[in-house]
Amino acid sequence: MPTLDEFLEEATAFLAFNADPKGDGPFAWGDGSDSVAIFAHKTPEDERSEGAEAQAWRTTVFDAGFGWISGPAQYGGRELPSSYEQAWQALMGRYDVPSTMPFGIGLGMIAPTILAHGTDVAKQRYLRAMYRGDVIACQLFSEPGAGSDLASVQTRAERDGDEWIVTGQKVWTSGAQYADIGEIICRTDPDAPKHKGLTGFVIDMRAPGVEVRPLRQMTGGASFNEVFFTEVRVPDDHRLGGVNGGWTVALTTLMS
Ligand SMILES: Cc1cc2nc3c(=O)[nH]c(=O)nc-3n(C[C@H](O)[C@H](O)[C@H](O)COP(=O)(O)OP(=O)(O)OC[C@H]3O[C@@H](n4cnc5c(N)ncnc54)[C@H](O)[C@@H]3O)c2cc1C
């Protein structure tokens, strides 16, 4: 294992070669953009080119060994202590690098959930790809009747042999318009107490029966979506955690 100093030397060499240092002129109130929007008004073309830039940057970072510094080696991580990850983030903050916002939900919330609760099939298929920027994930929790009261979700998943059939609607899904996969919480036992009848899955956003409809914001952009599921088939090896153990899975995501 490299020492922290050796690691930082390697990281500095990588950043010096691949990015420009941020200008370090003095901060002055009133300089810079007045935009305070969390979700900017972007055209689909802007979104595509920013997405491509973000993806290319994540791939470059991952292939150089900085994409998942503290993750397990078997899924593409480097198994270094989390202090190395923090040192990398602090160092990277001094350079002008592309925004990786499209990966925020996937790497911040969904990948840790797949690592904690996914089957080996899901871990092998998605973790490395997510950290490398090849797969973008969204979070499919909220519904028209289930916001703060998340355990009220009504989207159903019914077992059919080695598959589940998902039907229902989610809402406010950030980034669903460009996501490849989503973490979905579904009702699998309507007769159980509401927190005990839920199951989590990884769902393919391009599967037949998935329809993403943008929600236009009053600022003009459309970063959120409604997502409709009509008899979407999900293999059982894409289940997260136990059947009816979805509340624990949802908590892992939200705590991450
Ligand atoms: C920027 C942003 C991004 C988001 N992205 C996603 C996403 O990617 N995926 C996703 O699944 N969801 C997403 N959401 C949805 C978000 O998680 C929900 O908005 C949240 O769960 C709250 O639900 P709601 O909006 O339906 O509000 P409600 O639950 O309807 O709450 C409305 C109001 O009532 C209050 N309230 C609710 N219940 C009670 C109670 N029992 N007692 C007292 N007061 C109460 C609340 O505090 C709130 O003020 C996003 C939201 C935002 C703002």
Image (spheres, rainbow, N blue to C red):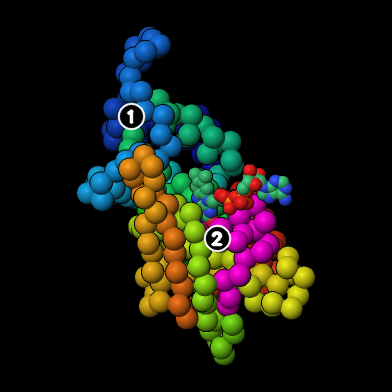
Instruction: Looking at the picture, tell me which residue is in the foreground, 119 or 235.
Output: 235
Task: Say which residue label 2 marks.
Answer: 144
The amino acid on which the numbered mark 2 sits, given as a three-letter code, is Pro
Q: Amino acid at mark 1?
A: Asp
Q: Is residue 86 above or below residue 58?
A: above
**Residue at the disc numbered 1:** 96
Q: Earlier in the sequence, mark 2 or mark 1?
A: 1
Residue drawn at 61 percent across, 55 percent down:
147
Most extreme residue toward the bottom is 161
Q: Looking at mark 2, is its residue's CB closer than 8 Å to ligand 1?
A: yes
Residue depicted at 56% across the width and 88% down the height:
160
Up/down of 151 relative to 35, above or below: below
Instruction: Classify 20 as above or below 165.
Output: above
Q: Residue at x 38, y 78 (%)?
A: 208
Q: Residue at x 38, y 64 (%)?
A: 212
Q: Is residue 62 visible?
A: no
Task: Give the spatial CA distance, label 2 vs label 1.
Answer: 39 Å
**Residue 251 lies in what quarter of the image?**
bottom right
Counting other residues with Cα less than 10 Å from the Cα at mark 2, is it few (<14), some (14-19), or many (20 or more)? few
Q: Residue 82's x, y, as percent? A: 58, 41
Give the side of residue 54 with respect to residue 65, left or right: left
The stretch of residues the image draws in magenta is 138-157
